[in-house]
Image (cartoon, grey):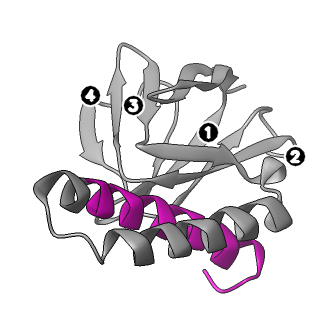
Amino acid sequence: MANPLHCNVCIPTRELFSGQVYYASVPGADGSYGVLSGHEMLVATNRNGGVLTLNLDEAGTSKRQFLLYEGAAQVFNNVLTVLGRFGVDVENIDVDAVRAKAEAMREHIAELEKASDEQHHAELETSKVRLEWYEIQLDYKEGRA
């Protein structure tokens, strides 16, 4: 019988998950890796657009999956903490809403590209990152990831 470990999945604005898991497949920047109870201490960066899969039961029949953008993971003292710049439970991705946000962001970016001051440049770069996040979600849901 396997022992669970505690897992926290968070983005800057909120906690996406907190609970016991029996296994986690973490999308590391250098490839996915598995985490079980008793895992060695670890700090690693996440792959952009990777999917974190959590097995909530020992048999692996109950799972939660989170799409992540950037961030890092840490294993310490039998706790896995996964942080993302952006993240979402894959079950909660609303394709129509994300598509509308992406189109609005494309229009916003087009307007910002016409400006030349530093403030608009900073907003342009941030907007491009957000658009990339929307496109990652659409690619995932539409099977292009």
Disc 4 element? loop
Tell me the crowding category of disc 3: few under 14, some 14 to 19, or many 20 or more residues within 10 angstroms, Cα based. some
- Could you tell whether 122 is left or right of 68 in the image? left
| Distance CA(mark 3)–CA(mark 1) | 10 Å
Quadrant for residue 4, please give it. top right
Q: Which SS class for mark 2?
A: loop
Amino acid of disc 3:
His
Characterize the local packing of mark 1: few (<14), some (14-19) or many (20 or more) Cα atoms within 10 angstroms: many
- In the rendered structure, does residue 140 fall within the stretch colored magenta? yes
Q: From mark 3 to mark 2, how far is it between C-alphas? A: 22 Å
Residue under circle 4? 41
* Frontmost residue, 30 versus 68: 68
* Residue for point 30% across, 54% down: 123
> Would residue 115 be found to the left or right of residue 85 on screen?
left
Sequence-first tag of 3 and 2:
3
Q: CA distance from mark 4 to mark 1?
A: 15 Å
Q: Which residue is mark 2?
A: 61
Q: Residue furthest top?
A: 77
Task: Point out the tag, 4 or 1, that comes first from the N-terminus.
Answer: 1
Q: Residue at x 41, y 72 (%)?
A: 111
Q: Which residue is mark 3?
A: 39
Type of amino acid under label 4: Met
What crowding class fits label 2: few (fewer than 14 Cα within 10 Å), some (14-19), or many (20 or more)?
few
Label 3, secondary structure: give it: loop
**Residue 68, percent across and down?**
51, 52
The main secondary structure of the magenta stretch is helix
Q: Which residue position is annotated with label 1?
A: 23
The residue located at (62%, 67%) in the rendering is 104
Looking at the rendering, the stretch of residues picked out in magenta corresponds to 123-145
Which corner quadrant holds the C terminus? bottom right
**Residue drawn at (29%, 77%), measured in percent from left and top?**
114
